[in-house]
Image (cartoon, grey):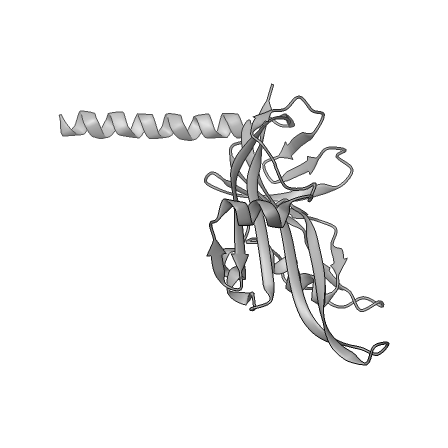
Amino acid sequence: MKLYLIFFLSVLLAACKNKDIISASKFPAELNIVKVNKISIRLFINKMEVKDKDVIDSFIAGDKEFGVSPHAVSGSDKLRFFSADTASINDGNEKVAVTRTQHQFLFTSVKPSYQSLEYFRLIGNMNKYRSELGGPRYDGKYAVQNMMVGYGNYSEIEIRVFNYKLVKAHKGFDYYFGIERLYRSVNAGKVFNEFDEKYVNSLTQTDTLAIEEYSYTFRAK
């Protein structure tokens, strides 16, 4: 009986491995966006999370990036897998490298983009998955590989996204009036990545950060 059970499990394991090999060999694979999945909106002041909905709504009011609702999508956005480790988004002109670990997919741009140290510190460090900074360019900006993360398989995958709004206040001297004043800077946008919870620890007493997390589902026809 034990020998039969061992033989049965061996056959089953081999079948699963063969199935994975067969499914992974169906390239190129084209996936279309089909759904938006809402997760949450969170607000942080200093290093503390604020859960009062009225306060959250007041802070993000008027920001066009915020207010994502779950719904079906019939769009032209596509994710193409050319092989198990190469893909492209939409136009296909720029390919990205794919690293798969079980159900997680990391997409890394082949060509770098260039960011200032200040931008990387304020915005780049929000990303849970990010590359190291490369060498500086002639204009003082640094090379960085853009990264994107998703979960699923080669026929259906959820790409993680978050919107952010970061308001920082700092003191500065107003030379016109000859007094010290409080200035506000606002950074807002959309990132194809997961929010890094550790970023909250970098917020100061004058910082307010809103994060809206959601995902896009891409599925093969």
Q: Is residue 194 visible?
A: no
Task: Give x and y (percent) for residue 27.
Answer: 62, 27
Q: Outermost residue toward the left?
A: 1
Residue pictured at 58% horizontal, 44% vertical: 57
Task: Give x and y (percent) for residue 168.
Answer: 65, 64
Give the position of the C terminus as an image quadrant: top right
| Vertical placement of residue 99 versus 209, above or below | above
154 relative position to 138: left or right: left
| Vertical placement of residue 218 versus 161, above or below | above
210 relative position to 180: left or right: left
Task: Give x and y (percent) for residue 6.
Answer: 22, 30
Q: Nearer the viewer, residue 162 or 113?
A: 162
Give the position of the N terminus as an image quadrant: top left
Task: Give x and y (percent) for residue 77.
Answer: 70, 29
Quadrant for residue 131, please give it.
Answer: bottom right
115 relative position to 98: left or right: right
Q: Is residue 55 visible?
A: yes
Residue pictured at 51% horizontal, 26% vertical: 23
Q: Outermost residue toward the bottom?
A: 178
